Image: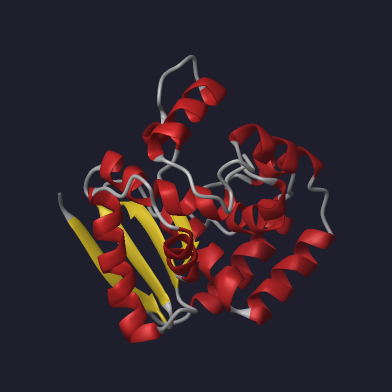
Amino acid sequence: MKYSLTKVQDKIWHLTFDCRYDLSMHFLRYQEFYESPNSKFRGKKFTIFEFMKWYSFKYSDGCFEYPIHWAGFNIPIRIFKEIKNIGIDDRNQYDIFMYKIYDQIKKVDGEDSYLIGTYSKEAGNSTFEHEFAHAMYALNKNYKKEMDLLTKSVNTASAYSYFSEMGYTKKVFKDEFQAYASEVAIDNAKLLGLTKQQKEKYVKVYQKYKGATS
C-alpha cells in the first residue's frame, strides 16, 4: 500500500493513496460517521459489514460500489476522538492505520485540524480543490462567510436535489455547493444551476483564501 501524508496549509493535511480501494476503505468509517445520509451510521457506532450491506442495496443492486462512487474525503480530526470514545467493535487494519495518522496530525496541529483524502492518480486536480474547499469552509470563518453570502444569492434547488440523489445528507448541502462551485479544473456551472459569472465569483474566493502551502 502506497500513501503520502502532507501538510498543505495551517491545520489542513492531505492523505493520498495510490489505490482507490485503499483510499475509500480507510476513510469509510470516519466519513460516514461524520456525514452519512443514514442516521443509523451518522454519529453512531457501526461495523463495516453493516454499512457495506446497506450501501450495496441502497445505491446499487447488491454490489458494493463505494470505492467507485467516491474519490475524495474530508473529515475534522475531532471525529477520530469521537469514534474512539464510543468504541469500535470491528477494529481492523484500516482503523489501525488511520489512528496512526490521527496521532501524527494531533501531535503537530492539535484536535482542531482537518484531514482530506484523495486518489493520487485521479486525473486533474478537481478532487483536491473540492476537498480543500471543505477544509477551508470548516476552519476559516471569513471564507465560510463569503461563500455563504454567494450561495444565498443564487438558486440552489436543482443542485440540492442532485446532492440528495448522490447520497449527501441535507446538513452539508451548503458546504457541498461551495466546494463544487470552487472547482477550478471543471466547468460544472450548468450542473449547479450557476451562470459562468456566478461560478467565477466562487473560484475567486477560493483562490483568495487558498494561499501559500505549508
> Looking at the image, which residue sits at the far top?
61
Q: Quadrant of residue 206?
A: bottom right
Q: Residue at x 38, y 47 (%)?
A: 89
**Looking at the image, how many numbered discs can be counted on the residues?**
0
The structure residue drawn at horizontal position 33% and vertical position 76%, both measured from the top left corner, is 105
Q: Is residue 126 visible?
A: no
Name the one closer to the observer, 152 or 63: 63
Give x and y (percent) for residue 158: 77, 38
Colouring mode (rainbow / by chain / secondary structure / one colour)? secondary structure
Q: Which of the 4 image quarters holds residue 117? A: bottom left
- Where is residue 198, by image quadrant? bottom right
Side (left or right) of 89 relative to 167: left
Residue drawn at (52%, 52%) of the image: 33
* Residue 116 rendering spot, x and y as whole percentages: 41, 62
In this rendering, is residue 24 above or below 126?
A: above
As drawn, 75 above or below 20: below
Q: Is 104 placed above or below 155 here?
A: below
* Residue 169 can be seen, yes or no: yes
* Position of the C terminus by quadrant: bottom left
Q: Name, please, the residue furthest toward the left.
A: 1
- Residue at image coords 58%, 49%: 42
Percent x, y of residue 22: 26, 44
Q: Position of residue 175 (x, y in %)?
A: 65, 58
